[in-house]
């Protein structure tokens, strides 16, 4: 029953372009954020979880998050720098749902130079140009659960993308999540 939500989390994780040994932050530890933390761990990527809800953060710890920080306890930037040997996070997945733009400010603060931020949640869209420019951060807005979503030919007529050019479509992301959950 979590296949689609898992595929959304998986596509958001893929959009960060991380590799084994990298470190990623997940801002927002709701259901999609929880799944993202576990997928990151499965991929050999250290996950750092950030939320205001202590119960959600406890689940992230159980899901093997390297850090689970309650944002009500203050700014996590120093702790992130300490954990990453001064580098910051290689990627940031924003899975929060808020009218506030606070997740963008936090992402810019904890990201390393030239990191990629993957937006999965729905948040306020104002961010500091200076904070993003000074680190040359990249922002990708995740297309639901992968390439093919919202394409009438792909979804309606069954036209497939060439696997050599688009190896991970919405269908393959969903298949992989279901395979992992079985």
Image (cartoon, rainbow, N blue to C red):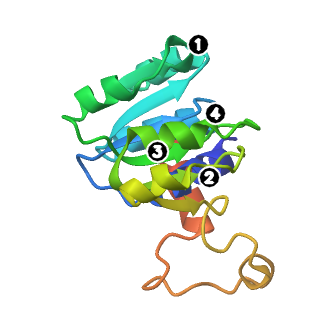
Q: Element at badge 2?
A: helix
Residue at x-position 46% and y-position 46%: 92
Q: Nearer the viewer, mark 4 or mark 3?
A: 3
Point out which mark residue 31 bears: 4
* Relative side of 164 to 12, left or right: left
**Residue at numbered disc 3:** 108
**Residue at numbered disc 2:** 8
Q: Is residue 45 visible?
A: yes
Residue 167 image position (x, y, % from top left):
46, 75
Residue 144 image position (x, y, % from top left):
67, 59
Q: Nearer the viewer, mark 3 or mark 2?
A: 3
Instruction: Answer with mark 3 or mark 2, whichever residue precedes in sequence.
Output: 2
Residue 30 image position (x, y, % from top left):
63, 30
Q: Element at badge 3?
A: helix
Instruction: Answer with mark 2 or mark 1, whichever residue precedes in sequence.
Output: 2
Disc 4/disc 3 C-alpha distance (Å): 23 Å
Residue at x-position 46% and y-position 29%: 49
Instruction: Answer with mark 4 or mark 3, whichever residue precedes in sequence.
Output: 4
Q: Quadrant of residue 164?
A: bottom left
Give the vertical position of 85 relative to 133 (above or below).
above
* Relative side of 153 to 105, left or right: right
- In this view, the residue in front, 132 or 164, is 132
Disc 3/disc 1 C-alpha distance (Å): 25 Å
**Residue at numbered disc 1:** 55
* Relative side of 120 to 76, left or right: right
């Amino acid at each position: 029953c979590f296949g689609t939500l898992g595929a959304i989390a998986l596509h958001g994780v893929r959009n960060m372009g991380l590799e084994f040994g990298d470190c990623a932050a997940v801002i927002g530890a709701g259901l999609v954020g929880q799944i993202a933390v576990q997928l990151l761990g499965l991929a050999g990527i250290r996950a750092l979880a950030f939320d205001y809800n202590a119960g959600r953060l406890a689940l992230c710890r159980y899901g093997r998050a390297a850090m689970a920080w309650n944002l009500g306890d203050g700014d996590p930037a120093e702790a992130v720098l300490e954990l990453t040997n001064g580098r910051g996070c290689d990627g940031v997945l924003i899975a929060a749902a808020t009218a506030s733009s606070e997740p963008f400010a936090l992402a810019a603060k904890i990201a390393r130079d030239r990191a990629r931020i993957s937006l999965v949640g729905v948040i306020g869209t104002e961010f500091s140009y200076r904070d993003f420019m000074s680190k040359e951060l990249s922002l990708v807005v995740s297309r639901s659960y992968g390439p093919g979503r919202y394409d009438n030919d792909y979804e309606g007529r069954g036209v497939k993308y060439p696997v050599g050019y688009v190896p991970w479509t919405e269908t393959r992301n969903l298949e992989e999540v279901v395979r992992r959950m079985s």
